[in-house]
């Protein structure tokens, strides 16, 4: 071993390199009873979640974090809602037709989440990879809570979720979200406007009301789930600096 | 947990449960025929039959993508779709709803697959319990013979192959059904199962079923057709 290393050092021209931090594994657990058969000691990677409405800048932040983490020598994997092999296609179809009832839609999303939990998140964490989640159970729970679903039922359902190492909620006011959505594609999404709730027939009004309800629920569950509320009205770089410094401390934990 | 009658629904829900080969589907079919002949408003619903969820379920099963957790969730999704879109509205309209398997099938199967029992029961917490549950208690060997005599092609999940009980599908099926039977028996008192001795002739069982239903349920009839 030591001989091999010596040879390598002399053969390779010296390159300037920051020392790569090897993250310390942190103890993991599920929110509830969890998924059967998971050995926590083997989950050496870190799970980092970015939450926030459409237009809060989630994808830009995640793209920047991936860039930064990989250049710092960490392997990354990304997950997000409606990305499972098992049901993403069917879920999209059902949502377009707006044909599923509330509990059914909720369970369909939970199936999508569980499939990614077991087939992507857990294997990646076992391989020591940094998992970046573009939304997690909080969005799913908040959406349902706004629609009057039983909180205890949701807590039990998402007891299968692993507690992340860091959760950031990118908080943007509904008014600013409207501006960002229009700047991007001149339109507001049916579901992101909560049109199924019948808050208003007017899409604009409904969006403002719905996003305010969502924000309220996020802030209410913040203490329980211990996530960091990030003021996302600032510039992309400013926000990313904040996320990085928090993640750096997670890596050293 | 409350029954539909306790919740004030005008309709009633009757479910049949039991392991594969216990003859429960035959019995519920005969019950349905009997009720129909009385001009009753009857609806029949089968486990795992929601059109919406079907393509995901069959993909998951075909490609063996399902884990105990996703197996459980996708069946709960299927049940919720039928429950919210069909069962509840029909029960509100006074129908007698007959279910070939109900939440107890999930309780038994998912628990055998290793899901925590409290979690599984919580998933189905939105559902009311049936007004009557018939449990067809058959001898394990008799049920196995009924299914296995034709040496049918057993499907992967049906045989519980995902549990790795055995590499032989027939042996795996036997072990799996045995475990399910244990789970059913354990739930029997808690959920007031009406236990029917499924080793008896079809006719004997059916007359007990009809007697019990007749004593407890007065099915709403279809409105007379005016010509």
Image (cartoon, helix red, strand yellow):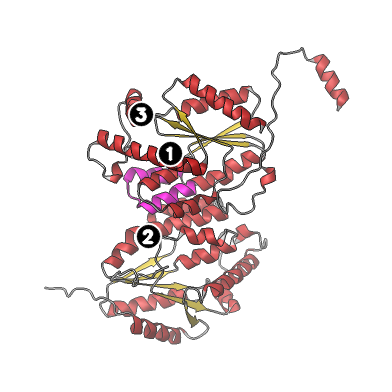
Pointer 3 with pointer 2, Cβ within 8 A: no
Residue A243, percent from left and from top: 54, 27
Element type at mark 3: helix
Please name the predominant secondary structure of the magenta segment in the image.
helix
Element type at mark 2: helix
Q: Which chain is mark 2 on?
A: B
- Which residue corresponds to the image point at 12% horizontal and 73% vertical from the top-left? B226
Residue B7, percent from left and from top: 33, 68
Question: Which of the labelled discs sits on residue A177, or is there none?
Answer: 3
- Which residue corresponds to the image point at 34% horizontal and 37% vertical from the top-left? A212
**Foreground label between 1 and 3:** 1
Callout 1 crowding tier (Cα within 10 Å): few <14, some 14–19, many ≥20: some
Q: CA distance from mark 1 to mark 3?
A: 17 Å
Callout 2 crowding tier (Cα within 10 Å): few <14, some 14–19, many ≥20: many
Q: Earlier in the sequence, mark 1 or mark 3?
A: 3
Disc 2 with disc 1 on a shared chain: no
State the residue position of label 2.
B82
**Foreground label between 2 and 1:** 1
Q: Which chain is mark 1 on?
A: A
Q: Is residue B125 left or right of residue B11?
A: right
Residue sitting nearer the eye, B156 or B220? B220
Callout 3 crowding tier (Cα within 10 Å): few <14, some 14–19, many ≥20: many
Task: Give the quarter of the image for residue A68.
Answer: top right
State the residue position of label 1.
A219
Residue B138 within the magenta-colored segment of the rendering:
no
Q: Is residue B67 left or right of residue A220?
A: right
Q: Which residues are magenta?
A: A88-112
Look at the image and tell me whether residue A82 can be seen: no
- Which residue corresponds to the image point at 48% horizontal and 86% vertical from the top-left? B201
């Amino acid at each position: 071993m030591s001989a091999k290393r010596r040879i390598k050092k002399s053969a390779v021209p010296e390159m300037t390199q920051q020392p790569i931090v090897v993250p310390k594994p942190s103890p993991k657990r599920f929110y509830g009873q969890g998924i059967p058969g998971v050995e926590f000691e083997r989950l050496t990677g870190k799970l980092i979640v970015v939450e926030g409405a459409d237009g809060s800048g989630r994808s830009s932040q995640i793209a920047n974090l991936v860039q930064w983490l990989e250049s710092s020598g960490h392997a990354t994997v990304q997950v997000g809602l409606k990305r499972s092999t098992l049901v993403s296609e069917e879920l999209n179809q059902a949502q377009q037709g707006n044909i599923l009832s509330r509990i059914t839609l909720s369970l369909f999303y939970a199936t999508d989440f569980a499939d990614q939990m077991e087939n992507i998140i857990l294997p990646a964490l076992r391989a020591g990879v940094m998992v970046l989640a573009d939304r997690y159970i909080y969005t799913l729970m908040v959406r349902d809570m706004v629609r009057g679903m039983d909180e205890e039922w949701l807590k039990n359902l998402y007891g299968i979720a692993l507690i992340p190492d860091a959760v950031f909620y990118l908080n943007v006011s509904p008014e600013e979200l409207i501006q960002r959505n229009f700047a991007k594609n001149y339109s507001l999404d049916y579901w992101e406007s909560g049109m199924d709730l019948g808050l208003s027939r007017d899409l604009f009004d409904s969006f403002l009301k719905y996003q305010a309800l969502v924000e309220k629920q996020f802030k209410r569950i913040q203490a329980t789930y211990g996530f960091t509320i990030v003021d996302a009205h600032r510039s992309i770089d400013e926000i990313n600096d904040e996320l990085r410094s928090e993640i750096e401390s997670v890596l050293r934990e | 947990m409350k029954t539909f009658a306790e919740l004030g629904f005008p309709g009633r829900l009757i479910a049949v449960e039991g392991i594969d080969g216990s003859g429960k589907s035959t019995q519920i079919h005969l019950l349905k025929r009997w009720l129909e002949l009385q001009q009753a408003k009857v609806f029949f619903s089968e486990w795992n039959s929601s059109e919406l969820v079907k393509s995901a379920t069959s993909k998951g099963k075909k490609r063996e993508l399902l884990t105990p957790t996703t197996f459980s969730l996708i069946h709960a999704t299927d049940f919720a779709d039928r429950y919210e879109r069909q069962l509840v509205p029909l029960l509100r309209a006074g129908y007698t709803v007959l279910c070939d398997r109900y939440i107890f099938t999930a309780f038994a199967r998912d628990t055998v697959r290793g899901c925590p029992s409290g979690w599984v029961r919580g998933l189905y917490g939105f559902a009311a319990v049936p007004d009557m549950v018939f449990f067809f208690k058959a001898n394990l060997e008799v049920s196995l013979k009924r299914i296995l005599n034709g040496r049918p092609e057993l499907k992967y999940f049906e045989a519980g192959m995902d549990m790795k009980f055995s590499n032989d599908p027939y042996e795996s099926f036997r072990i799996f059904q045995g475990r399910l039977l244990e789970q059913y028996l354990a739930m029997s008192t808690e959920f007031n199962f009406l236990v029917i001795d499924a080793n008896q002739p079809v006719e004997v069982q059916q007359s007990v079923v009809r007697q019990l239903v007749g004593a407890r349920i007065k099915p709403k009839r279809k409105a007379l057709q005016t010509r």
